[in-house]
Image (cartoon, rainbow, N blue to C red):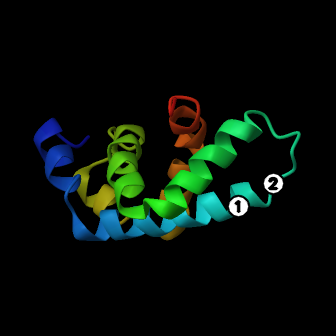
């Protein structure tokens, strides 16, 4: 399990920030193509539009959420997260961010 200090350091890891930046862009694009009957679709569309205009800010906000999901892993495993793992964690957090954007 990563310590809180390790998690704090990882929050500023270039690799995780870069992966998360691309993952939020991919998530936003995917949301733009999802069916209208998707739960929270309107909020998700709002988040997607905002994210595509504010990619760096969106990624910076999302990194702590990704780290929170991975808090039980050793720091070495967090550093080695695959793109697919980061994408899944971003996707899992979109509704949280989308429904709190008001």
Q: Residue at x 53, y 52 (%)?
A: 50
Q: Residues within 10 Å of mark 2 (few under 14, many from 20)?
A: few
Residue 65 location, quadrant:
top left
Residue 16, compared with residue 100, is above or below; it is below
* Res 88 visible: no
Q: Is residue 17 left or right of residue 9?
A: right
Which x, y percent locates residue 47?
57, 46
User: Depth check: 68 or 2 in front?
Assistant: 68
Which x, y percent locates residue 54?
43, 59
Residue 30: image tag: 1
Q: Is residue 19 left or right of residue 31?
A: left
Q: Residue at x 35, y 55 (%)?
A: 57
* Res 77 visible: yes
Residue 91, compared with residue 41, is above or below; it is below
User: Depth check: 54 or 38 in front?
Assistant: 54
Residue 41, compared with residue 22, is above or below; it is above
Which x, y percent locates residue 48?
60, 53
Q: Quadrant of the N terminus?
A: top left
Which x, y percent locates residue 79?
29, 63
Element type at mark 1: helix
Q: Residue at x 73, y 34 (%)?
A: 40
Q: Which residue in the structure is indicated by mark 2?
A: 34
User: Depth check: 13 or 101 in front?
Assistant: 101
Asked if disc 2 and disc 1 are in contact, CB closer than 8 Å, the reply is yes
Q: Residues within 10 Å of mark 1 (few under 14, many from 20)?
A: few
Q: Residue at x 73, y 58 (%)?
A: 32
């Amino acid at each position: 399990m990563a310590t809180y200090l390790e998690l704090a350091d990882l929050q500023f890891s270039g690799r995780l920030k870069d992966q998360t930046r691309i993952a939020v862009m991919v998530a936003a694009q995917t949301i733009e193509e999802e069916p209208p009957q998707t739960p929270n679709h309107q909020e998700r569309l709002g988040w997607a539009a905002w994210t595509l205009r504010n990619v760096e800010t969106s990624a910076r906000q999302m990194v702590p959420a990704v780290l929170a999901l991975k808090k039980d892993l050793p720091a070495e495993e967090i550093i080695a997260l695959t793109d697919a793992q980061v994408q899944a964690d971003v996707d899992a957090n979109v509704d949280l961010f989308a429904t709190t954007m008001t």
